[in-house]
């Protein structure tokens, strides 16, 4: 089977499941919002169409073109991210101002696209300038500073999850390129500083971290979400409560069809369902990994590693949050969570993968 | 997977496999974690989840309804709309102000509400306004989107259909006090419950209070009800039927609207109280909202004492209405022959003091019959002397004076029938003969309640059968549909009572009778006037009508009708009304007229 077909198959299985789970988890909210239970499922369906379009168009664009335009696109996205910090420009939900409203009521979240195009840009830049990477200032420091600017913008929206993700992908890509290992000690320093000023000093984040490891301390406040998530997952048992039967989605668990859709899935489909989903993700990542093995072009390989990290880290951290290993930070589960921007951004990622496969292996070499 | 060529690859160069291995390890950790949550601890979380979605809600039981003798609804329950706010979601002070502005309510006790909210969990709703109007509800609902954390709760409250009417005997409810709670907690009462504070609401509390039901409801995280899982229906309180005739009650209330006083109408044979009026009254509906401290103070310090049920919570000197009982004692003890005439010169000298008769020119030679009819004081002074105070007390007690009648209402007073022993015990002084004279005409230490009066006259009208008064006709769900009539025969000769009854009849029928003004052939009333002195008047002050009101005499009339075959007995006292014949007797006549006319118009039911 072609790698491309495999990737698409796994994606669509996950997307189909997403449609079902979003429908199940969002019913109560849909009735509140629009008087009908299926409103979010219908929207999710259109977002999936958006995903398909993104895959289609991205996979048509030659990677050369992508690399060439990655810099101006990235600059534009940084501008958009910066503009979000001006009060009144963006649209806010729950005190987080992350969105632009496009004509037609569509929500556009620049951070979701910034991390994709940052990956593309980084792959291009790191390979072009790979000889200079051994220089501390021109190498790791330069990219870290740019990354920090973008991450700071995202962090101030606030969107902790995407900021961390951006940083993580950057680190992975720098590690994969010619940056000497010793340079990474700077991250130890930066990491401590960031942690101190942006986590320890920001009450709500610190409380969230505390709550993650001891949620019963404040079951009605910080610990609430994680306890409810545990209850949802735990009460699912082996076989789950049955599709549609879960009651944790009845406003007990906040964000049941976006960031915490994994919990509701665990709640309704049980351990069996969860393992099935994790296996799907696993297969998808395994396929990505296989593809990476076939890539000859350095630039494309670095891009693939970045994209791989981008998806894997999102999936793993989202799962970690809902099972209570990492603090909550607001990252959607790729392909599963409800949301337009992240689905379209995922579409772009998958489109890039397909393009890499086509350019590296052609029509023939795409099977194993 | 195909073998990777040894070429210039990042993967090979930097051994990115380590990263991959890391991811795989993480994945394994997840699966272990999920296994722990779902399979090892699944049961615990399932239980938690069950807790999460269910709430137990109380369903308040409707309190028992109260009907009158004719089945008219006197007290029912109506829904009260209360406004609640959740301190966690809304600033209380702002919410109170906003709603007060919206509904034009006064906000004098915001501070109290806020103080009350201090020692409660912040997610628990607190009542900020009780019993607001429907208009206000509509306004709040319309502005709901602006008022997060504010919601409306409905609870049943008492509604007294006739307002002020019969307020004293019905009573009112109030929030349970800590002291009451100590006693009632074993019976399932809780803080914030309402209990009967006075009248029948208090006495019948165990019957009127139902058993709250409960329902287990499935709720979402905002506490909104999704569906009802299980429901235990509340058991409403027992309905109660009273002996009261609310029309008669209301009629008497209009007669006594502008005076202070009391009136009670009793069925002679059964002791059923047909009306019980105490004036001034109050509207028990004001208690439903919960009185503010100021309102309560005003009500309590009102010089008219509107909360007092004068029929049984006030004791008055009986004045001449006491004379028939002295006469009974005299005849029974045979200290005088009924035909024996005594002389009344208008005064009676005892030692150095002179005791006046109300008729200054005197009654001349007069026997028992005329002495009662014309209410001769001097005649009764002499009877009193012959009997002595202890004999008078003995017979007075026989007729129920000086002790509680045992009616089913709280706060009944005993009144006072003095005796030598009593005075020695309580005042530490020996009895003076002169005091016996006062007692013989129902003055001095003697105090009786209008209810005792009506019961005692009932015993005379009944030819010696003493009937215990009652006001509760039946209670739904209790054994025996009607409460048995409790009565006993007094050890008094029939002949004695016939003499007394003849005299009482002539008080009204006879031209010289003190209440001849109310004579009406259609409704022959028998009874006795009484004018009870409030203060002892000094010699020389003669024009009583000029006296300031609070010093004027109390006016009594107690009687029964029809005189020959008594059906009802009526007592009326008008505080500071002056003469019994002019102030009280006409009211009794009107009551009797109303009772018998109404009886002939509509069916008089079983009696």
Image: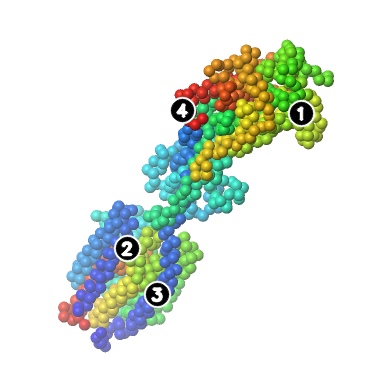
What chain letter is assigned to the residue under label 1? Answer: B
Residues flagged by tags 1 and 4 on a common chain: yes
Callout 1: SS:
helix
Callout 4: SS:
loop
Of badges 1 and 3, the one in the foreground is 1
Query: Seen in the image, is B401 located left or right of residue B249?
Result: right
The residue under label 2 is A244
The residue under label 3 is B35
Q: What is the CA distance from the residue labelled 2 to the residue labelled 3?
A: 22 Å
Residue ID at (31%, 72%): A277
The mark nearer the N terminus, 4 or 3, is 3
Q: What is the CA distance from the residue labelled 1 to the residue labelled 2?
A: 90 Å
Q: What is the CA distance from the residue labelled 1 to the residue labelled 3?
A: 96 Å
Task: Give the farthest residue toward the right.
Answer: B351
Callout 2: SS:
loop
Query: Seen in the image, is B406 located left or right of residue A313?
Result: right
Q: Is residue B536 above or below residue B414?
A: above
The figure's colour scheme reads: rainbow
Residue ID at (20%, 81%): A367
Callout 3: SS:
helix
What chain letter is assigned to the residue under label 3? Answer: B
Q: Which mark is residue B603?
A: 4
């Amino acid at each position: 089977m072609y790698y491309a077909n495999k990737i698409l198959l796994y994606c669509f299985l996950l997307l189909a499941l997403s449609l079902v789970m979003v429908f199940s988890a969002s019913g109560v909210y849909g009735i509140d919002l629009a008087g009908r239970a299926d409103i979010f499922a219908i929207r999710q369906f259109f977002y999936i169409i958006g995903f398909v379009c993104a895959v289609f168009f991205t996979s048509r664009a030659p990677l050369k073109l992508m690399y060439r335009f990655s810099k101006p696109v990235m600059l534009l996205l940084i501008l958009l991210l910066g503009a979000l910090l001006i009060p009144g420009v963006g649209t806010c939900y729950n005190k987080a101002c992350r969105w632009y409203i496009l004509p037609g009521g569509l929500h556009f979240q620049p951070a979701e696209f910034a991390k994709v195009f940052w990956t593309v840009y980084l792959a291009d830049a790191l390979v072009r300038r790979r000889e200079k990477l051994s220089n501390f200032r021109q190498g790791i420091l330069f990219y870290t500073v740019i990354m920090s600017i973008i991450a700071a913008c995202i962090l101030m929206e606030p969107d902790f999850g995407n900021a961390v993700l951006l940083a993580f992908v950057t680190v992975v890509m720098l590690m994969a390129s010619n940056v000497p290992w010793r340079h990474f000690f700077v991250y130890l320093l930066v990491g401590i500083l960031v942690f101190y000023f942006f986590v320890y000093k920001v009450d709500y984040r610190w409380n969230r971290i505390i709550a993650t490891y001891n949620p019963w301390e404040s079951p009605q406040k910080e610990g609430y979400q994680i306890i409810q998530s545990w209850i949802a997952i735990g009460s699912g048992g082996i076989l789950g409560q049955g599709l549609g039967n879960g009651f944790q989605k009845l406003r007990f668990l906040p964000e049941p069809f976006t960031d915490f859709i994994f919990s509701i899935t665990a709640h309704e489909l049980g351990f069996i369902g969860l393992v099935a989903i994790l296996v799907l993700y696993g297969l998808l990542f395994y396929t990505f990994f296989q593809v990476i093995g076939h890539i000859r072009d350095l630039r494309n390989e670095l891009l693939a590693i970045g994209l791989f990290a981008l998806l894997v880290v999102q999936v793993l951290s989202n799962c970690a949050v809902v099972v209570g290993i990492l603090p909550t930070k607001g990252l959607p589960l790729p392909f599963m969570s409800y949301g337009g921007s992240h689905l379209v951004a995922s579409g772009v990622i998958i489109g890039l993968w397909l393009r890499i496969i086509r350019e590296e292996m052609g029509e023939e070499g795409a099977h194993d | 997977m195909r073998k990777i060529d040894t070429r210039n690859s990042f993967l090979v160069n930097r051994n990115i496999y380590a990263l991959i291995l890391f991811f795989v390890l993480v994945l394994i950790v997840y699966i272990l974690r999920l296994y722990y949550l779902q399979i090892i601890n699944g049961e615990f979380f399932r239980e938690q989840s069950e807790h999460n979605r269910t709430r137990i809600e109380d369903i308040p039981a409707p309190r028992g309804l109260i009907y009158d003798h004719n089945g008219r609804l006197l007290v029912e329950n109506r829904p009260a709309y209360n406004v609640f706010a959740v301190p966690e979601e809304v600033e209380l002070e702002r919410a109170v102000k906003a709603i007060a502005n919206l509904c034009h309510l006064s906000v004098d006790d915001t501070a109290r509400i806020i103080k009350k909210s201090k020692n409660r969990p912040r997610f628990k709703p607190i009542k900020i306004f009780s019993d607001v109007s429907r208009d206000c509800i509509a306004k709040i609902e319309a502005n709901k989107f602006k008022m997060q954390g504010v919601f409306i709760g409905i609870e049943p409250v008492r509604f007294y259909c006739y307002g002020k009417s019969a307020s004293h005997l019905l009573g009112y409810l109030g929030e349970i006090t800590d002291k009451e709670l100590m006693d009632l907690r074993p019976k399932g009462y809780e803080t914030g419950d309402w209990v009967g504070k006075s009248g029948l609401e208090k006495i019948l509390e165990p019957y009127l209070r139902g058993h709250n039901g409960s329902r287990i409801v499935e709720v979402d995280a905002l506490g909104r009800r999704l569906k009802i899982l299980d429901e235990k229906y509340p058991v409403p309180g027992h309905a109660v039927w009273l002996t009261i005739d609310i029309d008669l009650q209301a009629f008497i209330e209009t007669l006594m609207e502008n005076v202070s006083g009391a009136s009670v109408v009793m069925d002679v044979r059964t002791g059923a109280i047909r009306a019980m009026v105490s004036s001034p009254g109050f509207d028990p509906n004001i208690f439903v909202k919960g009185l503010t401290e100021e309102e309560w103070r005003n009500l309590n310090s009102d010089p008219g004492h509107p909360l007092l049920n004068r029929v049984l919570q006030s004791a008055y000197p009986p004045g001449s209405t006491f004379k028939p009982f002295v006469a009974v004692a005299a005849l029974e003890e045979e200290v005088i022959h009924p035909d024996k005439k005594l002389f009344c010169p208008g005064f009676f000298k005892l030692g150095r003091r002179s005791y006046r008769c109300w008729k200054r020119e005197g009654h001349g030679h007069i026997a028992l019959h005329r002495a009662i009819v014309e209410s001769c004081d001097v005649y009764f002074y002499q009877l009193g002397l012959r009997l002595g105070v202890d004999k008078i007390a003995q017979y007075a007690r026989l007729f129920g004076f000086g002790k509680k009648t045992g009616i089913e209402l709280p706060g009944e007073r005993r009144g006072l029938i003095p005796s030598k022993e009593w005075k020695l015990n309580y005042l530490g002084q020996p009895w003076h003969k002169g005091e016996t004279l006062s007692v013989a005409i129902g003055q001095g230490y003697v105090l009786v309640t209008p209810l005792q009066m009506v019961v005692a006259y009932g015993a005379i009208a009944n030819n010696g059968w003493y009937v215990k008064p009652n006001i509760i006709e039946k209670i739904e769900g209790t054994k025996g549909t009607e409460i048995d009539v409790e009565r006993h025969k007094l050890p008094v000769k029939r002949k004695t009572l016939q003499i007394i009854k003849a005299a009482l009849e002539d008080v009204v029928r006879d031209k010289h009778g003190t209440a001849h003004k109310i004579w009406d052939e259609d409704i022959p009333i028998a009874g006795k006037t009484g004018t009870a002195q409030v203060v002892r008047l000094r010699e020389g002050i003669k024009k009583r009508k000029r006296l300031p009101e609070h010093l004027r005499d109390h006016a009594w009339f107690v009687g029964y009708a029809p005189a020959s075959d008594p059906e009802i007995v009526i007592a009326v006292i008008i505080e500071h009304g002056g003469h019994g014949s002019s102030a009280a007797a006409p009211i009794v006549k009107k009551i009797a007229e109303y009772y018998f006319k109404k009886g002939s118009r509509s069916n008089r039911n079983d009696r």
